[in-house]
Image (spheres, helix red, strand yellow):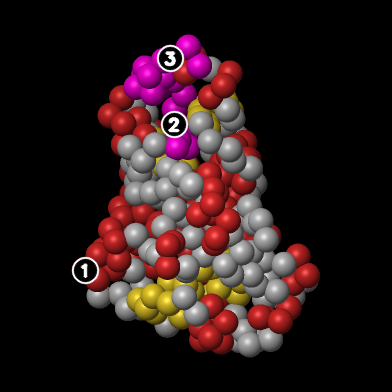
Amino acid sequence: MDGTEFYMGDIISAKQYDREKIEYLIDLANKIETNKEEYKTFLQGKVMAALFFEPSTRTRLSFESAFAYLGGKIIGFSSAGTTSVKKGETLADTIRTIANYADIIVIRHPKEGAAKLAQQFSNVPIINAGNGSQEHPTQGLLDCLAIHSLKGTLDGLNVGLIGDLKYGRTVHSLAYLLSNFKINLYFISPEQLKMQHRVKDALTLKKTPFKETKHFKETLPLLDVIYMTRIQKERFADLEEYDKVKNAFILGSEELKVVKSDAIILHPLPRVNEISPKIDKDPRAKYFEQTYYGLMMRKALIASILSKEI
Ligand code: NCD
């Protein structure tokens, strides 16, 4: 396969994606899903390095699973504690080295500038799997695939992003991506955790309507997509501040009564207590199904990047 039409380069920010690219990736994810056999050896001989300097379950394992299902091999670490970072090695030197051992690097790091820095020092493609509280573009893309698959469209929806909109990186990337569609956004958060200005400024430029509110229960009946998030405890400098907001919004059986019958409930996971396990069996609860879209989208992203070299 020539594949040059697939090539998308590094994935650093969700701002790289316009409507056409998002739709292309959704189509490719579905195409790979329906032709699994054909793609089984797609990445034969390729190696992915997964460098996780922060905890992860779904992101790391779905990247690894995606790469393995496409026939490639995986190296990496899930904690910097066992690497030379512990001896004082810089991120630049770590990246320069690993770029010699892999065809693609997936990196999650607590520093906002990490993915960009890795890009500067790598001669293989870099995928940002979360840079501090700034962005998580591949999660946003899998969320778009989930919404598209479950609602049949990304247009004409009222989407509520709920919880920690300040430190939650997934909602930043998702908001950037959804601004390519005809969508109404509702940002529901405590005062201290309002959506970051850089995201709101980007939405204003794109003329994407958004409304900020503290009123969770009153807004719920309007929503087609309810995107819950965890309050990001690890980003708080003062744990007393965390305690004040940790139970700000909880979606349980009572709250569900006012939710539209065809709405969908998403969450990037892990959840702490913002969604009661009591509603897990409700047909609107799609957060575990959502994790499967992670595998599908990550296969599409990896294939689109590496097919140039195949
Ligand atoms: C999120 C993350 O790491 O940003 N999880 C994920 O990748 N699915 C959300 C979170 O940690 O709350």
Query: In percent of the image, x 50 and y 80: which residue is there?
Result: 215
Residue that carries the numbered disc 3 in the rendered image: 88
Task: Rate crowding at label 3 as few (under 14), some (14 to 19) or many (20 or more) other CA atoms within 10 Å.
Answer: few
SS for tag 2?
strand
Q: Which of marks 1 and 2 is nearer the N terminus?
A: 2
Quadrant where the N terminus lies?
A: top left
Q: Which residue is drawn at 58% across and 38% down?
A: 55
Eyeballing the image, is 201 above or below 260? above
Whether residues under marks 1 and 2 lie with C-beta atoms below 8 angstroms apart, the answer is: no
SS state under label 1: helix
Residue 108 is a magenta residue? yes
- Which residue corresponds to mark 2? 104
Q: Disc 2 marks which amino acid?
A: Ile
Quarter holding residue 39: top right
Residue plotted at (51% across, 31% down) = 53
Residue bearing the label numbered 1: 205
Q: In the rendered picture of this protein, how many numbered marks are placed on residues?
A: 3
